[in-house]
Image (cartoon, rainbow, N blue to C red):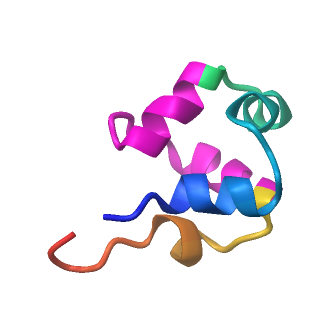
Amino acid sequence: MENKVKIARTQVSLTQQQLAEKIGVTRQTISLIEKGKYNPTLKLCLDICYTVNKTLDEVFWIEKGE
């Protein structure tokens, strides 16, 4: 599965640290989300999407088989 969170973050020229500060989490949390090792809450997903100007579907939708 491609890393849609990382792609969305880099498209708006944010580092992990910058994104983390904007949404009130640690850089480590962003790193774990990008690696697929942390299952974010719906609120955290929405915060990420609002910050990177994407929809939930664009960033977090998983196709069957991924």
Residue 30 position in % (x across, y down):
57, 34
Residue 58 position in % (x across, y down):
57, 76
Q: Which residues are magenta?
A: 28-51
Residue 32 position in % (x across, y down):
44, 31
Q: Main secondary structure of the magenta part?
A: helix
Q: In this rendering, is residue 20 above or below 51? A: above
Residue at 84%, 36% in the rendered image: 22
60 relative to 66 in the view: left or right? right
Foreground: 22 or 35? 35
Which residue sits furthest left?
65
64 relative to 61 in the view: left or right? left
The reply to whether the magenta stretch includes residue 1 is: no
Q: Is residue 49 visible?
A: no
Residue 40 position in % (x across, y down):
48, 41
Residue at 81%, 33% in the rendered image: 18
Residue 55, quarter of the rendered image = bottom right
Foreground: 11 or 40? 11
- The quadrant of the picture occupied by the C terminus is bottom left
Foreground: 1 or 24? 1
Q: In this rendering, is residue 26 above or below 65? A: above
The reply to whether the magenta stretch includes residue 49 is: yes
44 relative to 51 in the view: left or right? left
Residue at 71%, 71% in the rendered image: 54
Residue at 29%, 79% in the rendered image: 63
Residue 28, quarter of the rendered image = top right
- The quadrant of the picture occupied by the N terminus is bottom left
- What is the total number of numbered labels drawn onto the structure image? 0
Q: In this rendering, is residue 47 above or below 1? A: above
Foreground: 43 or 32? 32
